[in-house]
Amino acid sequence: MDVAQISDQDVETLFGFDEGHFLDFKRIDIQPAKMQRTVSAFANADGGEFYIGIYDPSNGGSKTWDGFNNPEAANAHIQAIEAILPLGSNYRAEFFHWSGGPGLVLHVEVFKTRDIVKTAAGEIYVRKSAQNLPVRSDDAIARLRLNKGISSFETETVNADFEVISNSTVIIDFLINVIPHSEPEKWLAKQMLVTASKPTVAGVTLFAEVPQALLPKRCGIKIYRYKTNAEEGTREVLDGIPATVEGCLYEQIATSVAMVKKLIESIKRMTLDGLVEIEYPEETLHEIITNAVIHRDYSIPDDVHIRIYDNRVEVESPGTLPGHVTVQNILDERFARNGNIVRILNKFPNPPNRDVGEGLNTAFRAMEMLKLKKPDIVPRLNSVVVYIRHERLASPEDMIMNFLSSSATINNGKAREICVIREDWRIRSIFKRMVDAGMLEKVPGSMTSNTSYRAVPG
């Protein structure tokens, strides 16, 4: 295991951190079995890290460094972690050595896991703020399973006649395009959208004409327009009555995207060229709204909320990030809480989730193409909010100069990459402006086809 040397400044920074939802400090005399509670809690929540060998007194005194005499002295702790995370892929550990304190501090990072992690004693914990809270009741364990995506509310049955989905206009229109052709009853049963002659939540949300009548407050979309840039919208700045979008999921998504786009186009902002319309890429709105609808937790009695401000759009989806998905890996990892909904919605004509698993990547790229900042994804206690802000990235000139602060030269291809500009002629124009302004100069001897530039000294 690696031993990293850290400086006085690093330790000062480390000692300045407070214990919280993602961070904990432990003494080396902590019992390995008790330490497993922290491992379980982090793995079952959003992940986190802890340091064994740093004493953080509860009375608010100063932290102290008191580590292990050698790496072997921490074997019992490492073995305790391995006992409940046996594959070694859900955590990372290293030792820190500091010349100003005795011994080695063990730094452990625990990642959010797909499955529920128990201690060796069979106990389940979850991290909330700076506490490791036990999960004991059947209801609490069931909620944790839903949060982690181990089970999904979409498979629950709805107390309604099967005919609400087998005889709906939605299923009849849908099956016209399904090959081979089949009767609604047979096809729905084959797709596991009916159990014991009762429709499932997935079946109702996909094919009932008005799912909201059968699942009130669980599958609607609310759209608000606030005429303000403030952090919170209030009744005083609410523009009209919030709109409620109902219908099957396919119709909801299309209607909501069109409605949000129309409301955004009504927003104007003052520039040097006068009043201009606010512009958001439609791909971003479409993909983020689609994700909010199909990946939400349908067990939570709440709607998807879309709030439109003068300078941003907020999309709030009920439920935590499922499985092992975190804010840090969400663009790379794939996990569908509602597998049936995702799979069958993709069978509709011109499906809203056409590129399954690539929606957020598309949304982020579309924002970059307009030189807008990437969306922010913020988990809350029982929901996830995506903030789509109308804030410009740095100008191309700033991006180029920032690049040259750590690189000697830049050419057209590299400038197009960092500025997210496709056309080489636009970069040539930017280079010319910067040369005329005395910011850049051509690198002597570079060829016309691949001219390089460097920052003017001073």
Image (cartoon, rainbow, N blue to C red):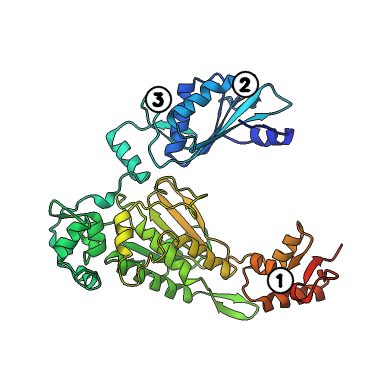
Between 155 and 205, the residue placed more toward the observer is 155
Would you say the residues marked 1 and 3 are in contact, meaning their CB atoms lie under 8 Å apart?
no
Q: Amino acid at mark 3?
A: Ala
Q: Is residue 60 above or below residue 381?
A: above
Q: Is residue 94 above or below residue 294?
A: above
Q: Secondary structure at mark 1?
A: helix
Residue 151, how many percent across, how many down? Answer: 30, 45
1 or 2: tag closer to the N-terminus: 2
Mark 2 neighbour class, 10 Å CA radius: few under 14, some 14 to 19, many 20 or more: many
* Residue linked to disc 1: 412
The answer to whether residue 20 shows anywhere in this view is no
Q: Nearer the viewer, mark 1 or mark 2?
A: 1
Residue 107, how many percent across, how many down? Answer: 59, 32
Q: Secondary structure at mark 2?
A: loop
Residue appearing at x 40%, y 25% in the figure: 120
* Residue linked to disc 3: 120
* Residue linked to disc 2: 68
The answer to whether residue 257 shows anywhere in this view is yes
- CA distance for labels 2 and 3: 24 Å
Residue 133, how many percent across, how many down? Answer: 41, 32
Q: Amino acid at mark 2?
A: Phe
Between 45 and 346, the residue placed more toward the observer is 346
